[in-house]
Image (spheres, helix red, strand yellow):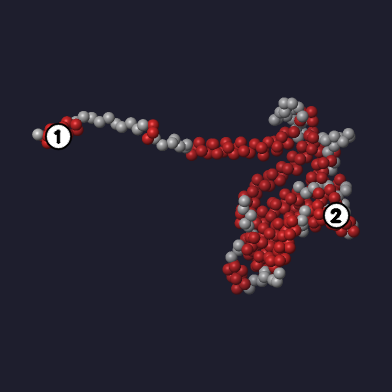
Amino acid sequence: MRTDTAATAEPAASLVPRLPEVAGPSSRGPRRLSPAWKKVLFYGALCVVAIPFVFPTWWMITSSLKPVNEIFAFPPSLWPADPTLQAYVDAFTIQPFARQYFNSVYIALFVTVGTMLVSAMAGYAFARIRFPGQNLLFMVVLMGLLIPSEVTIVPLFQMFNSWGMVNTHWPLLLVTTFGAPSVLATFIMRQFFVTLPVELEEAARLDGLGRWSIWWRIALPLSRTALAAVAIFTFLHVWNLYLEPTVYLLSPELFTLPQALTRYTDAYGGEMWNVQMAASTMTALPVLIVFVFAQKQFVEGLAQTGLKG
């Protein structure tokens, strides 16, 4: 009797339509953002983080277009009410700024090329040529990074003064080419040449190449990324050099840009802020442009030489 009742109940229950199941709020997972919104949030966060770095540059450029009284106005303005280029004109008329600009350019280029050449040869020698006391000599070279330039400035001044080179550009060319920037550049190049496969040199020797030809034809062309890092680092260091020009140079015609920026004062000794901002803008923008276009090579060069952060 029970069996018949169960048999008749099952088809009756199958005839009742079933409603679709509605998932409750607890069954849903967390709502995910689309890739487009993730990109918007990412770039928005980068813009916020970049404000402390971009704002000083923006303030420098806009202040160069303002008169002095507007620079210190309260509340400050982010854009000049009446932009003017008079500060840029005054930068060239108050002192020989064009000649000083040329001095910085040619000194930076000369030292950069010289440092690249010296560091490439020294780095290759420390990485590939085996000789007695190699590691000890390399440690002695690296110790040059531990000596501040202020410690050696007095004996170097006496030496160049005895040679009659004071108030010339020779101390800047020689000290910076063979000084601390060259030591760091030698370390970077040495770390890069260590990573080169030994099979390249062995194949070159089978082809009859000597040590100099191997360095010039094989090792040096392969070290473009490391050389780019050395070039950017050295150029920025020499471009911003201030202590050595202050010690060795006396004539305004021989000044470099960092030294020239401190000489924009009025008849009462007050700072000409708008003119200084104009000169600083002309000094900083070329370096910013070079770094923006060469930052990829700079990062790759440091990454390949073991100086990753």
Q: Residue at x 72, y 44 (%)?
A: 286
Q: Is residue 308 left or right of residue 160?
A: left
Residue that extends furthest to the left in the rendered view of this protein: 1
Which of the two discs, 2 and 1, sits closer to the camera?
Answer: 1
* Residue nearer the viewer, 20 or 62: 20
Q: Mark 2 to mark 1: distance in Å? A: 110 Å
Kindly identify the amino acid type of the residue bearing the numbered disc 2: Val
* Quarter of the image where one finds residue 146: bottom right
Considering the numbered disc 1 on the image, is that residue within a helix, a strand or a loop?
helix
Rendered image: mark on residue 154:
2
Can the viewer see residue 123 in this picture? Answer: yes
From this view, report whether residue 8 is shown above or below residue 176: above
Residue 289, above or below 65: below
**Residue at image coords 41%, 37%:** 29
Q: Which part of the image, by quadrant, shows the N terminus?
A: top left
Q: Would residue 117 be visible to someone looking at this image?
A: no
Element under label 2? helix
Q: Residue visible at 75% across and 58% down?
A: 144
